[in-house]
């Protein structure tokens, strides 16, 4: 049960933070895993997985799986994302850590081990795959002819390009020996049950962590088109392999996926609905705008600001007081060097500039994994006096936005939201409170 929220008129910051905490709690693996676990098989049960929620998902499966039923496996998660209570004891599922969002040697070593463990299984065996956002970088096993350096360079370019998550993961699938359905194909003839936490607009399992256990409908030609669209350079050998179609992924209808099951155990919409319910319980009407908003972060911030002004000035499409909630995955096209910040803070700085101190509007945006980009904060909060307080400190909001340095604007104001790793990930959470 969620604790009661503070009075939004007396403590708007506390109210918004409470909504965010409620959204995160709804997505914790410990609360949602049990309903989706299959019975133990005749043979062995192997747990494989990757993602920012991987450690918490492994801990949940270990706690819920019958004590007398064999269980083993390997899951890779981001550095510092293993729940302390699981890290402190010897669990039946090994959890290792690697880098995100750019893959490193530790992720490569983990992927190599998972690749080897997936082979030689029988039809009596069960593979539980625990997949969550971040798995694309954490489960990094380059396809033949591609080096880790190649993957790292392409990944960095994609992250700076402004490409949508579906586009980035289409490319990642075709440069991998384990993603895009290849992991499940390796497990044949064992049955594969995938438990996944969605961090992508539309909740498509083929996009989450680049879909290592589900067939892929995209093609090498699609990946090439995306790389051309964003002007991303490729090593000649990689380009030739994509052009020849030798890096193609397993497709829908492939017999190796027969009998497999995929369960979404937590989604962005569920977290938004939990936050909306908490707001209504506190007497504030709440509206979920969408759980799959994409686009340039600062522009999405401007749109949310325009919606808040419409509510204030015209009572449309909602009347105040109200809170407007949204999720999804926006993007940041990095055009400057040296700036700090992720999608959430860039969204907020765009919103703050558009609001121009509009009375009665408070905004929180944060990433539900507790990490905004690669920084030490989850997000931040905008209040009616944000710009004025910035001016008093000599901070010029537009200059910071132009420098992709939203962190550098909000940190001196004391307006960052810092949670540390949350051990789950249903992507962006945004709440606009209009009083």
Image (cartoon, grey):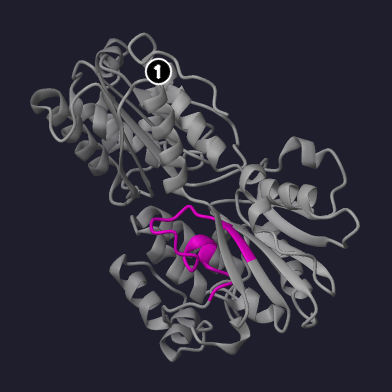
Q: Where 400 sits versus 95, above or below? A: above
Is residue 284 rendered to the left or right of residue 101?
left
- The boundaries of the magenta stretch are 194-214
Q: In the figure, residue 2 lies in which quadrant?
A: top right
Q: Where 368 sits versus 215, above or below? A: above
Is residue 160 rendered to the left or right of residue 111?
left
Q: What is the secondary structure assignment of the residue under circle 1? A: helix
Q: Residue at x 63, y 79 (%)?
A: 259
Looking at the figure, which quarter contains the N terminus? top right
Say if residue 183 shows up in the picture: yes
Looking at the figure, which quarter contains the C terminus? top left
Q: Residue 94: image x %, image y %?
A: 80, 55
Is residue 90 rendered to the left or right of residue 145?
right
Q: Residue at x 70, y 76 (%)?
A: 191
Query: Is 178 colored magenta in this rendering?
Result: no
Front-lying residue, 143 or 260: 260
Q: Where 418 sits versus 47, above or below? A: above
Identify the residue under disc 1. 13
Q: Residue 104: image x %, image y %?
A: 63, 57
Q: Residue 426: image x %, image y %?
A: 49, 47
Q: Residue at x 41, y 40 (%)?
A: 272
Q: Where 267 sits versus 256, above or below? A: above
Q: In the figure, residue 240 lies in which quadrant?
A: bottom left
Say if residue 405 shows up in the picture: no
Q: In the figure, residue 254 lies in which quadrant?
A: bottom right
Please identify the dominant SS of the magenta region: loop
Front-lying residue, 55 or 414: 55
Q: Residue at x 9, y 24 (%)?
A: 313
Front-lying residue, 60 or 209: 60
Query: Is 196 colored magenta in this rendering?
Result: yes
Is residue 426 rendered to the left or right of residue 79?
left
């Amino acid at each position: 049960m969620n604790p009661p929220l503070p009075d939004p008129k007396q403590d708007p910051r506390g109210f918004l933070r409470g909504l965010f905490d409620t959204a995160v709690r709804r997505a914790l693996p410990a609360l949602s895993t049990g309903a989706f676990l299959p019975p133990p098989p005749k043979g062995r049960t192997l747990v494989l997985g990757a993602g920012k929620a991987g450690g918490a998902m492994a801990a949940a499966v270990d706690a819920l799986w019958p004590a007398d039923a064999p269980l083993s496996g390997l899951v890779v998660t981001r550095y510092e994302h293993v729940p302390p209570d699981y890290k402190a004891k010897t669990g039946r599922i090994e959890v290792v850590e690697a880098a995100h969002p750019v893959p490193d040697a530790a992720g490569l070593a983990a992927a190599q081990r998972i690749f080897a463990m997936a082979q030689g299984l029988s039809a009596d065996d069960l593979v539980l795959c625990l997949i969550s956002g971040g798995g694309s970088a954490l489960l990094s096993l380059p396809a033949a002819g591609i080096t880790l350096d190649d993957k790292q360079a392409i990944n960095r370019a994609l992250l700076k390009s402004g490409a949508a998550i579906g586009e980035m993961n289409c490319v990642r699938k075709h440069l991998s020996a384990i993603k895009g359905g290849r992991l499940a194909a390796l497990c044949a003839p064992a049955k594969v049950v995938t438990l996944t936490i969605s961090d992508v607009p539309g909740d498509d399992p083929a996009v989450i962590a680049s879909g290592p256990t589900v067939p892929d409908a995209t093609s090498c030609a699609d990946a090439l088109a995306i790389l051309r669209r964003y002007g991303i350079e490729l090593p000649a050998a990689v380009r030739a392999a994509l052009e020849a179609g030798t890096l193609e992924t397993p497709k829908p209808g492939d017999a190796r996926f027969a009998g497999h099951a995929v369960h979404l155990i937590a989604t962005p919409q569920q977290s938004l609905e939990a936050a909306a319910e908490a707001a209504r319980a506190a007497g504030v009407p709440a509206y979920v705008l969408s759980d799959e908003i994409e686009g340039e972060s600062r522009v999405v911030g401007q749109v949310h600001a325009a919606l808040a002004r419409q509510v204030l000035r015209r009572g449309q499409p909602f009347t105040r007081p109200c809170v407007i909630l949204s999720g999804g995955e926006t993007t940041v096209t990095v055009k400057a060097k040296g700036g700090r910040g992720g999608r959430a803070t860039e969204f907020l700085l765009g919103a703050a500039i558009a609001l121009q101190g509009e009375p009665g509007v408070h905004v929180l945006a944060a990433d539900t994994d507790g990490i905004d980009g690669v920084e030490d904060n989850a997000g931040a909060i905008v209040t009616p006096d944000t710009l004025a307080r910035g001016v008093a400190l000599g901070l010029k909001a537009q200059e910071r936005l132009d420098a992709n340095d939203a962190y550098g604007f909000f940190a001196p104001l004391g307006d960052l939201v810092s949670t540390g790793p949350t051990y789950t990930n249903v992507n962006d959470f945004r709440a606009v409170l209009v009083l």
